[in-house]
Image (cartoon, coloured by chain):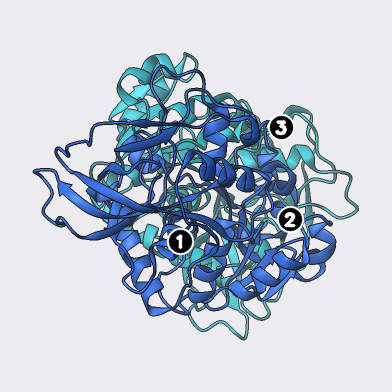
Chain colours: A blue, B cyan
Amino acid sequence: MKAIGIYEGAPSAKSQQFAEIELAKPVPTGDDLLVKVSAISVNPVDTKVRQATAVQSQLKILGYDAVGIIDSVGPKVTEYHRGDRVFYAGTNQRSGSNQEFQLVDARLVSLAPQKLSDADAAAMPLTMLTAYELIFEKFQAKFGPQANLGRTMLIINGAGGVGSSAIQLAKWAGFKVIATASRPETVEWVTKMGADLVVNHHHDLWQQLGDQYADKIDDIMILHSTENYFDVAAKLVRPLGHVGSIVETSKPVALGKLKDKAASFDWEFMFAKAKYEIEVESQGKILADLAKLLDSGAVASTRTQTINSISTTTLQQAHEQVEANKMVGKLVLVGPFN
Amino acid sequence: MKAIGIYEGAPSAKSQQFAEIELAKPVPTGDDLLVKVSAISVNPVDTKVRQATAVQSQLKILGYDAVGIIDSVGPKVTEYHRGDRVFYAGTNQRSGSNQEFQLVDARLVSLAPQKLSDADAAAMPLTMLTAYELIFEKFQAKFGPQANLGRTMLIINGAGGVGSSAIQLAKWAGFKVIATASRPETVEWVTKMGADLVVNHHHDLWQQLGDQYADKIDDIMILHSTENYFDVAAKLVRPLGHVGSIVETSKPVALGKLKDKAASFDWEFMFAKAKYEIEVESQGKILADLAKLLDSGAVASTRTQTINSISTTTLQQAHEQVEANKMVGKLVLVGPFN
């Protein structure tokens, strides 16, 4: 089977050497499924992991999101069978989805949404898991249509993959959603996703929101440059509210600014459950819930671009696009591997 | 009526000028109760507020915790009546409990535990509200006897007022409790409160706990020197776990150390609800729950010292003792004011 990866990261995808090798088809053991990968997406985290990869003696196979057909199952697997179409984001502890056949823990998987194409489904797992865990686990929103009426959420960097999923999920759950975007096409996109109000994160958020929303926003999601937005988030968040982020900080944070409000700061990191083997099965269950929302049309795929081939060339092209940091929605690659 | 307070803070209680003045007995309006104060406690926050008080033209009346008898009620109050015995921590937005008659919002109040003396009851509101909100709101523990079996909590500085309440509440709720204490009498005290394991916060907590508890402690409560304990808390907390603090930071915090575990940091500040008028009535309800726990003996008063007089002299003495930062449990002053 074909597998694509790298032996050493490069700071720019343009200078990255992607390699393709032939590997023996794996055999699933224990809780594992072996999935024939049909479509994948490239997330910003793929490019960050690629950049940070030191010299490897074995090929490092990148990629998280995947849609595929189960080829065979490990002896402990009872819920899934050969031929089932599944989708998942997997784990950062094992080889990724940029290969023809991938081993994945069945607990991290759900049947794919039936009404979505491979391309549309492949765009969703990592970003929706991240958005779901932030909204319904970290922020403790109620999971249900219109279940959080009266609550307001600010999503900083709404047009990216996680933001696009988060806007839709928060709207479905009844939040008033304020999203940030800076270009005409991203403003249009976050509005299409359901944002009630769009503000520009390249301008001062306090000036744009402070008069109306000081101490008023229940939950604030920082999806870009945590350090740049922490202070304004502390001023906008309501007392007892939550500020959550997925973007690591490079220096200490003035955490004390949240104290007087008795507010909380939540880190979201989708891979923590699998990495530390905590609540692992929750991710499969979340994906099953999300598949229902996607099939019902309550939430739409955020796929905006599709490349109809998975190869060293198309992967490099995809990394370049995602790395340019101007994505609107998600970029998907559909097989075959060639 | 007599009221005790200050016109200007002093860095040390030994040099503080407490003054006593005569004020007209207030008349309750709206949601207010007028309470004839029977007993009060002095908390560390009293000394911090006193120290930070700039010159005042009017007497600043300190004090939070109180037990007393309702003298009269505002026109909106239906739940309480003259003669009811109540306890509360009040708010930092109004004159405090160091006066013969105090106005307090009825929503912040509960009937006092029937089986406890004024002295025993006066020790509890502020510390138990703080401990309750951390454990059952911020850490999202289940409220019920043994309802959190399998979870472990670390309470840094267990022998103080909040720590002593927190150990008991966490034990009642089923946690395994690790508390820190440094002197023989504090070790004995936290053990009496119910700690399963005691470690010394003056020695390296990682060396004492790391082997067994790295990535294993569900919830960590920092009740002293947040900056000194944040890093070790980040190493001990379990993935998806919570670190909570009540002690403000004087400099930025390496918040990123919690990211890989997708953990949360929660500030607890008991006065935030009343100050920002959010979930105000929850505090009266919490106190009612706590009164039941105190009456049932599930939780005991943490009073360790009692002064049988409330005056400028005894308040100064109480501030000195609390300020010395060596308290075990709580210090209470019982009326009359004289």
Q: Return the chain for callout 2.
A: A
- Kindly identify the residue that appears in the image at 38 percent across and 57 percent down: B290
Which residue does the numbered mark 2 point to in the structure image? Answer: A235
The answer to which of marks 2 and 1 sits earlier in the sequence is 1
Q: Is residue A70 visible?
A: yes
Q: Badge 1 local density, few (<14 within 10 Å), some, or many (20+)?
A: few
Cα distance between the residues tagged 1 and 3: 29 Å
Q: Give the chain letter at badge 1.
A: A
Q: Closest to the observer: A317 or B243?
A: A317
Residue beneath label 1, please? A140
Q: Which is closer to the viewer, label 3 or label 2? A: 2
Residue carrying label 3: B250
Residue at disc 2, secondary structure: helix
Distance between the alpha carbons at the discs numbered 2 and 1: 21 Å
Q: Secondary structure at mark 1?
A: loop
Return the x and y of residue B291 as percentages of the image width and height. Answer: 38, 59
Q: Position of residue B95 (x, y in %)?
A: 72, 58
Q: Is residue A263 above or below residue B153?
A: below
Disc 3 secondary structure class: loop
Q: CA distance from mark 3 to mark 2?
A: 18 Å
Which residue type carries mark 3?
Ser
Q: Answer yes or no: is residue A138 visible.
A: no
Residue A59 is marked as none
Image side of residue A293 versus residue B271, left or right: left
